[in-house]
Image (spheres, grey):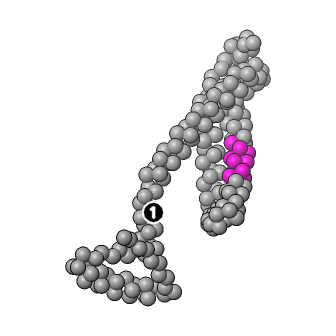
Amino acid sequence: MRANYFICFSEKTETEGFIKSFQEISKIRKSFGIQYDINSKDILENELINDLKPLKYALNITSLVLFIISGISIMSIVFFSTKERITEIGIRKTFGASRFDIFLQYISENFILSLIASLLAIAVSVIIVYITKNYLSETLYINFKTFLSLILFLKLLLAGILQGAMFSLFPCLYATKISVTDALRFE
């Protein structure tokens, strides 16, 4: 039969003293076939962290796969948008726009769209986290700590903008290579 007892101390020195005393008693009792286990909050926390490491790796891999899939979606949307605007590109080139001007136009449009989309995604995520936190605290009486700092916000914003710019790079380069005659003939 196994019994669990929870003992709390106000000071860390009291906890350490109790653990040392209990370990000495446990050694004596172990010789008689009676075994005790002692766990502290730190031990339980470390066990939980070690148990959740595979889940953390799986979530990181899933996030990376979703990042790539959404990037490919961004690339296809920008590519089809470029295909629809081929005549506009031809007209701009006939009026003297260089390849760099067209590239700058497309990359700046995609930068602005990525910025807006990233800000909206972060705002929706923060709202969902706070709603979930309040729901869990009211129903399960569990208080979760949420951590949102300016540095984290900037990292998320930068990741979204870089994703939009990186995956729209090839369609933007495609737009610059369209010749004037092909663009004006295109229907």
Q: Label 1, on which residue?
A: 48
| Foreground residue among 74 and 41 | 41
Question: How many dots with numbers?
Answer: 1
Please give left or right for residue 67 compared with residue 117 in the image: left
Question: Main structural element of the magenta stretch: helix, strand or loop?
Answer: helix
Residue 121 falls inside the magenta stretch: yes
Q: Quadrant of residue 20?
A: bottom left
> Percent position (x, y) of residue 88?
77, 23
Quadrant of residue 42 in the image? bottom left
Q: For the C terminus, which image quadrant?
A: top right
Q: Position of residue 96 (x, y in %)?
A: 74, 25
Q: Residue furthest left?
A: 31
Give the residue furthest to the front.
Answer: 1
The amino acid pointed to by label 1 is Leu
Which one is in front, 73 or 90?
Answer: 73
Q: Tell me the magenta residue range.
A: 114-125
Q: Is residue 144 left or right of residue 55?
A: right
